[in-house]
Image (cartoon, rainbow, N blue to C red):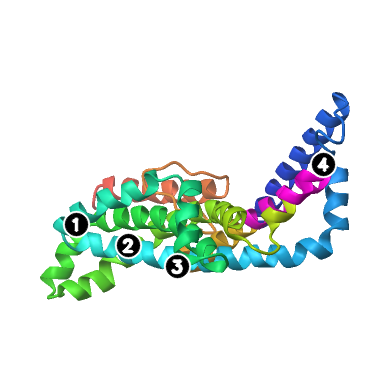
């Protein structure tokens, strides 16, 4: 039931967005060349699917390659910065400065350095992804339980073993937080790369051509497809997170000893414990013969 609710809620939310979109188009009598209805957008997506599908596969490939490279670089950089304060003080300002550069302004120099093709697109996606991953993992490494670190050192753990068995496992949850942030922006980076560095067909190029032809439904349909790729990639990261961190998604919520029972099922058990305790107190108060 809980799984079904988790699936149905996003579906209902998306359906409400489409319903609201359709009501605005119909209620304000918006012309098709300004903004199409959901039905017209989906029809344009269906009519151009044979052209869009190979282009979507190229965008997915760019996203996957760039995301993987950015995640590995961000994780390695965070571990390196966490080792010594001097290294962190040297690298962290550069890390912040790198994100102050607008991505669209970075695309042109990358094309000059790497040429047209797959390279600049992957580089842009990796550039976007590595920052949230690096910051999240660095924060996780900085907030490891001090008592656990002290215990590991007291038991003779070397610096490498403490890092491997204590500090790195503590970064799993922050790592996935950074990966989910990166996943939401990875497709954006791929599309920016396609706008600047594509010589052949691409989703961004198809959308630009459709815009020049005043095919508004195709423009919106391409946008819908790009959005679907981004959502799909985010959901894939969430699925991997659930598999990698099962302890964060317990089937039942743990109740602390000082908390009141949260359901009617716990009430009989608590009443039974109360009766047992009361009878024990009465027996202890009875005078011995």
Please tell me which of labels 3 and 1 falls first in the chain: 3
List the residue tagged with mark 2. 170
Q: Say what secondary structure mark 2 lies in.
A: helix
Q: Point out the image quarter for the N terminus.
A: bottom right
Q: Secondary structure at mark 4?
A: loop
Residue 69's tag is 3
The mark that comes first in sequence, 2 or 4, is 2
Tell me, for residue 146, which label it has, or none: 1
Residue drawn where x is 57% and y is 50% of the image: 265
Task: Please state which of the two labelled residues, at mark 2 or mark 4, is closer to the viewer.
Answer: 4
- Tell me whether the residue at label 2 lies in contact with that at label 1, contact meaning CB atoms closer than 8 angstroms: no
- N-term-proximal mark, 2 vs 1: 1
> Could you classify mark 4 by the number of other residues whose Cα lies within 10 Å: few (under 14), some (14-19), or many (20 or more)?
few
- Can you tell which quarter of the image residue 48 is in? bottom right
Q: Secondary structure at mark 3?
A: helix
For label 1, the SS is helix
Question: Can residue 170 be seen in the rendering of this structure?
Answer: yes
């Amino acid at each position: 039931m809980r799984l079904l609710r988790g699936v149905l809620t996003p579906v209902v939310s998306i359906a409400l967005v489409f319903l609201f979109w359709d009501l605005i188009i119909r209620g304000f009598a918006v012309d098709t060349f300004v903004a199409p209805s959901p039905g017209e957008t989906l029809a344009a997506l269906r009519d151009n699917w044979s052209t869009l599908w190979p282009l979507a596969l190229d965008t997915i490939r760019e996203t996957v390659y760039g995301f993987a490279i950015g995640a590995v670089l961000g994780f390695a950089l965070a571990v390196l910065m966490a080792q010594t304060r001097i290294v962190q003080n040297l690298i962290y300002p550069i890390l912040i400065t790198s994100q102050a550069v607008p991505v669209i302004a970075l695309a042109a120099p990358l094309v000059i350095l790497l040429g047209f093709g797959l390279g600049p697109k992957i580089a842009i996606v990796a550039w976007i992804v590595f920052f949230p991953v690096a910051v999240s993992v660095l924060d996780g490494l900085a907030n490891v339980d001090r008592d656990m670190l002290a215990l590991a050192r007291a038991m003779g753990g070397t610096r490498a073993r403490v890092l491997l068995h204590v500090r790195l496992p503590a970064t799993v949850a922050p790592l996935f937080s950074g990966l989910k942030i990166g996943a939401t922006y990875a497709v954006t980076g791929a599309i920016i790369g396609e706008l600047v560095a594509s010589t052949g067909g691409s989703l961004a190029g198809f959308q630009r051509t459709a815009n020049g032809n005043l095919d508004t439904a195709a423009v919106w349909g391409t946008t819908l497809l790009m959005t679907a790729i981004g959502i799909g990639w985010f959901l894939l990261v969430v699925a991997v997170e659930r598999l990698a961190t099962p302890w964060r998604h317990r089937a039942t919520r743990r109740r602390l000893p000082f908390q009141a029972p949260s359901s009617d099922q716990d009430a009989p058990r608590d009443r039974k414990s109360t009766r047992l305790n009361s009878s024990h107190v009465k027996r202890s108060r009875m005078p011995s013969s």
